[in-house]
Image (cartoon, grey):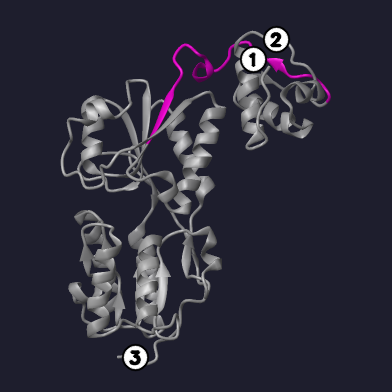
Amino acid sequence: MRKVSKASAADRAAAVLREECLAGRWRDRLPGVRVLAGLLGVSAPTVAAALARLAEQGVLKNEGPRRAFRLAETPPRFLTHEHPRHLLILTPDHLWTLDDATRGVIEHLRDRMIANGWEEDIQVLDYRHAKRVDRRWNHQIRADTNTCIVAVFGRPALAEWARRRKLRILFLGGVMGNVAVPMIGVKTSGMAALALSNLTDLGHRRIVFPLIGNSEPFNVSLREATRTALEAVGQSYVARQHNPESDYLDPGAIAQLMERLLAKRPPTAVVIQDWKILITVFCCLAAHGLRVPADVSLVLLSDRQDGSWFHPELARFRFPVARMATAVAKWLEAESPPADHLIFEPKFIEGRTLAAPRRTL
């Protein structure tokens, strides 16, 4: 029996024990916890947790304290090796470039599905700006009828491709379009509405919320959130001023956009959707001698574990990563996908980058 790594030890131990059970290593009862711990090279509590998980999944039977676990008479269908399920995670960007929350969901999901006997793969494919189905996807995407796809920041063209191929697909965030696709994520327009409301309550009116690298349907909801917040306090909404746009997430384009805004009339607050955009915006503000939050307030519509290291501490959102990963896993293990999407509510972290403007309009 091979040993397991200490990282995610209970999941890895459960995966190894499952393989041994299905391979027929034990006919009836498993050895005791301490014996298994020695074989696996992990602690006894780790083995106990792994055995408990296998009992929950129906692989083992727990006959009470101080008694060895027994093999279930009929292992669950999805745990057999006849047709191992395949999870393909599609992402338009490399994992290390994704926000903390998205990476966290993927990491939780991979650990859980591997522990449940699934094969998994991650593939980077630039579908973010696809307007229609790309025929090359038939050869590029490593999927067959036994594959379930989780697409990070999914797009309508990708949903249509999966529909034509009769493949199960779920979007981890993104835009659905006209094709019915289950989606799990957070509502960016909802976060924007909360951030904008906080800013207008402080007296901000010269608020800039750049829309960078988004699809048009996605931008529509963000424009509406900005318009609603400003008009609620009697401020006229001007799209090119409050929601300047750039088609691509490029530092040069973002810097030019900010320079144009700063040359005319500096904003008193900036709402930012992405960590990379935040870095460029902050550098532009610093180059013009503008301080945060004395001159400009900042809010990030994303989850950054290192947001507390930003000085001053960054106003941002915290996503329920573990709950989101569990929801995706339940969809993967279901016989049929849910009819609609599931939106989670993130928690607002106020930080110290919010302050009243020096002058209100």
Q: Residue at x 34, y 91 (%)?
A: 360
Name the quadrant containing residue 238: bottom left
Identified by mark 3, the residue type is: Thr
Identified by mark 1, the residue type is: Glu
Identified by mark 2, the residue type is: Trp
Name the quadrant containing residue 202: bottom left
Asked whether the beta carbons under mark 2 and mark 1 sit within 8 Å of each other, the answer is yes
Which residues make up the magenta segment?
66-89
- Quadrant for the C terminus in the image: bottom left
Please state if 350 lies on the left or on the right of 281 as rendered: right
Q: Which residue is mark 3?
A: 360
| Whether residue 155 is situated above or below residue 242 in the rendered picture | above
Q: Position of residue 294 (x, y in %)?
A: 44, 86
Kindly identify which numbered label has been placed on residue 26. 2
Q: Is residue 231 visible?
A: no
Q: Is residue 341 visible?
A: yes
